[in-house]
Image: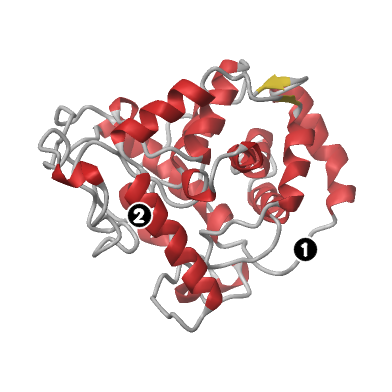
Amino acid sequence: MRIIVEEHPTILDVSELLRPEKSFTDKEVGKFRDYTVDDTDPLKERVRRTYKLMHTNQTVEFVQGRHQDWLKFDHFKANIREALEKLNDLVDESDPDLDLPNIVHAFQTAERAREEHPELDWLHLTGLIHDLGKVMAFYGEPQWAVVGDTFPVGCQWGESIVYRADSFDENVDGANPKYNTKNGMYKPKCGLAGLTMSWGHDEFLYRVLVHNKSTLPEQALQMIRYHSFYPWHSGGDYSHLTTEKDEVTKQWVLMFNRYDLYTKCTKIPDLEALWPYYQSLIDKYIPGELEW
């Protein structure tokens, strides 16, 4: 399937974006994002435990505290390559599809985007860095506050959130009348930018790039900020809080998620051979040392 990318993209067929051609992956599409409960499967149990901790602890108060801490951008300084190489030592505990270091997934995503859209160098770089916010895990942040699907705090939790049936039972916001209604602390149609998202790598990297004055285009920044917001872009939840403008953002995010999700496999690219090309993109869009 070929996607026409325009400055102002038309509405794309979401079903096509989430149903790639067989040549796209060596794994059946239905096998991705399998969150079935199986207490005899160590990988599935690891994923379920991670989400239980996330859904219990991601409250309005917790997220506000993370903003106060991380958005001072005073935890460390590093250039993009240095930060990426930290991901050699990170395995995402929320990921049911892959049990490899996150840097491998970064290059898999980037290379597939590059193959389909060789003319969009910013998209290649977006694929490479989209999970870079996970470096928080090396600075004291538990994985349940770093990885996994995101959702707005301060309102009813969407029905399509993974493990939704019982994983929020101990979240105190569920008993707070300011937060447990459909709109919660938001006005209807307030837009994505008006939502306070659960704390994780998406929001952190977006804020880091803005803070450090990256010249990546707005589409790239939105892909990074919302690529893990599956209950919205794939589950159909939260439409009462979003706007028509957000629907355009959704198409970009879904386009990107083809490369993020369906490239997860055990085929490892030659990272050293690829570095010179991606370093040239880093130098173009996000040069030098960044404040994190």
Viewer-proximal residue, 18 or 56?
A: 56
Residue at figure coordinates x 27%, y 29% from the top left = 191
Q: Is residue 17 visible?
A: no
Give 11 or 86, whichever is nearer the viewer.
86
The answer to whether residue 93 is left or right of residue 194 is: right
Residue 275: name its quadrant: top right
Q: Secondary structure at mark 1?
A: loop
Count residues near mark 1 (Cα–Cα under 10 Å), then give few for <14, some for 14-19, many for 20+.
Answer: few
Q: Which percent across, then down, holds residue 169?
A: 23, 57
Q: Quadrant location of residue 291?
A: top right
Q: Mark 1 or mark 2, which is nearer the start of the sequence?
A: 2
Say which amino acid is labelled 1.
Ile
Q: Is residue 255 above or below residue 141?
A: below
Disc number placed over residue 25 in the picture, else none: none
> Can residue 281 be seen?
yes
**Mark 2, residues whose alpha carbon is within 10 Å: few (<14), some, or many (≥20)?**
some
Report the residue marked by disc 2: 234
Q: Are marks 2 and 1 in contact (CB under 8 Å)?
A: no
* Residue at the (83%, 39%) spot, across then down: 277
Which residue type carries mark 2?
Ser
Q: How is the image coloured?
A: secondary structure
Pick the residue in front: 2 or 284: 284
What is the secondary structure assignment of the residue under circle 2? loop
Query: How far across and down, in percent of the image, does residue 175 sit?
Result: 14, 45
Q: Position of residue 215 (x, y in %)?
A: 62, 20
Q: Is residue 277 left or right of residue 228?
A: right
Residue, disc 1:
268
Mark 2 and mark 1: Cα distance apart in space = 28 Å
